[in-house]
Amino acid sequence: MARLQSTWWQQKKYVLNALILILPCVFIYQALNPTFPDLWQEQTVGEFKIAPMPLNMEQPYSHHSEYVKDFYLAFNQGDINAIRQAYLNIGPAPLPLTAFAKGDEGIMHGTDHGQHAHAIAPETISQDDKLWVTIQTWQNELLQQSWDIPQQLIINK
């Protein structure tokens, strides 16, 4: 049965449908072309040369009732297979290995080229905080190094 009246909805519904079909293309483009902050200064930790990079310049977020910040760590030198366990945290001092054993936060995981970690962090990052990496080798050697936090991530209280 044909409609005798041409309403606004009858005229515009196809344009609205076309816009809804185009919208996922915008999100796919953004997902396929991410932008990341610059790598931080490379530092030597035992036999390794590591350069960390936060995945965004936002404050830590709550993940399983603990605040974390996501980091990528580029390993530019050293054999990843020599690492027994490695952890990342943000704070005034490195956390002991027993603190990391309570859950799966802070554990580094990834490939030979780079590692990813949900660094355990305070709710807001302050001037006194640093990024700490703790590496335990298979010979039970404990290696620790820190990086200063850039000013963009620090919230002054």
Image: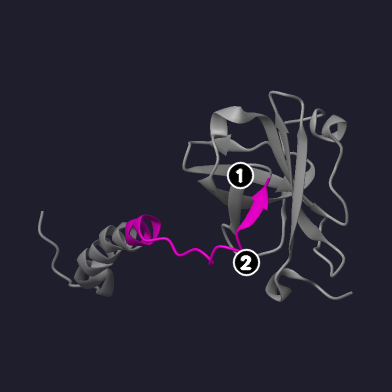
Relative height, residue 26 to residue 132 (above, below): below
**SS assignment at label 2:** loop
Relative height, residue 141 to residue 57 (above, below): above
Relative height, residue 4 to residue 48 (above, below): below
**SS assignment at label 1:** strand
Q: Is residue 135 left or right of residue 81?
A: right
Mark 2 and mark 1 residues within 8 Å of each other at the beta carbon: no
Colour mapping? one colour
6 or 146: nearer the viewer: 146
In the image, the segment drawn in magenta is: 27-45
Quadrant in which residue 54 is drawn: bottom right
| Eye-nearest disc, 2 or 1 | 1
* Residue, disc 2: 57
Is 29 magenta? The answer is yes
Residue at horizontal 87%, vertical 37%?
A: 96
Q: Position of residue 132 (x, y in %)?
A: 76, 51
Query: Three-letter amino acid code at disc 2?
Result: Met
**Mark-to-mark CA distance, 2 and 1:** 25 Å
94 or 136: nearer the viewer: 136
* Residue, disc 1: 48
Residue at horizontal 57%, vertical 43%?
A: 116
Neighbours of disc 2 within 10 Å: few (<14), some (14-19), many (20+): some
